[in-house]
Amino acid sequence: MKLTYLGTAAAEGLPALFCNCEFCQKARELGGKNIRTRSQAIIDDGLLIDFPADTYMHALNNKLRLDKVHTLIVTHSHSDHFYSKDLIMRKPPYGHNFAVDTLQIYCTKGAYERFVKEINNEEPFGNIEFHILKAFEPFTSNGYTITPLPARHQFSEDAFIFIIEKDGKRIFYANDTGYFYDNVWEYIKTNKIYFDLVSYDCTNVEIPIPDTGTHMGFENITRTKNLLKEMGAVDQKTIQIVHHFSHNGNPLHENLERLATPLDMLVSYDGMIVEI
Ligand SMILES: [Zn+2]
Ligand SMILES: [Zn+2]
Ligand SMILES: [Zn+2]
């Protein structure tokens, strides 16, 4: 599988939309890997993870043909992960000649309800199909087996992190979430799951956040990584990546690399490609 990180920031972006803090100032000045758009990733250019408002620019910057996307999986309904209004662009007259006739969308109930509310009277909407996800219930789409696990993130409604498998390889895409719930640990342990790649929520960077919080930072990630190793879920061959950064925690790329390298972890950036 080829995983491309299209956007790597939290909701506000880096530099943040209206912010003039020291990190945002520095990000504007330095550019390059310090420019981070809202979180999104794509596997093998056909399985899209999340749908922020930045999707359009992501397609342009990465030369993607979004009409070729067969599956969209949505972690949760926050607007930096699901900007449902843009889905209407898949409907004629806004789009024609799609390589894939029907886009399969697998999402939370909350995300679906938001879509219905925002699109309002635009039904019928023939070429996208929604499926509501349930935690611990794997499904298959276009040859990928995907298992949604509960994320500690949005207490008012479901939020998911995903295990994505194909051809004997396994990715754990784990944001947005706080420290994993007990039943997530249990699921990984009981099923003796091994990951070839883990992508961790690193929103807080160095700012401490308790395990009951809805994001993680390096301290929580280090413990998560160690426990996964103890369980045999990761080893020295596993590619481990920190991802999804808020401007508040000093997410300048150089600082993130300083923190991640001693842990044998990589730092995501917009446009980063990893193959397993
Ligand atoms: Zn987010
Ligand atoms: Zn800022
Ligand atoms: Zn969120």
Image: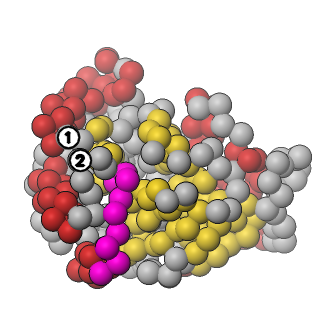
**Nearest to N terminus: mark 2 or mark 1:** 2
Quarter of image, res 87: bottom right
Q: Is residue 58 above or below residue 224?
A: above
Q: Is residue 38 visible?
A: no
Q: Nearer the viewer, residue 123 or 235?
A: 235
Q: Nearer the viewer, residue 15 or 176?
A: 176
Circles 2 and 1 in contact, beta carbons < 8 Å:
yes
- To which residue does mark 2 refer? 236
- Picture disc at residue 239: none
Quarter of image, res 229: bottom left
Pinpoint residue 153: horizontal percent, then vertical percent: 33, 69
Where disc 2 sits, the SS reads loop
- To which residue does mark 1 refer? 264
State which region is magenta: 190-198
Residue depicted at 44% across the width and 65% down the height: 162
State yes or no: residue 195 in magenta. Answer: yes
Q: Is residue 274 above or below residue 72?
A: above
Identify residue type, mark 1: Asp
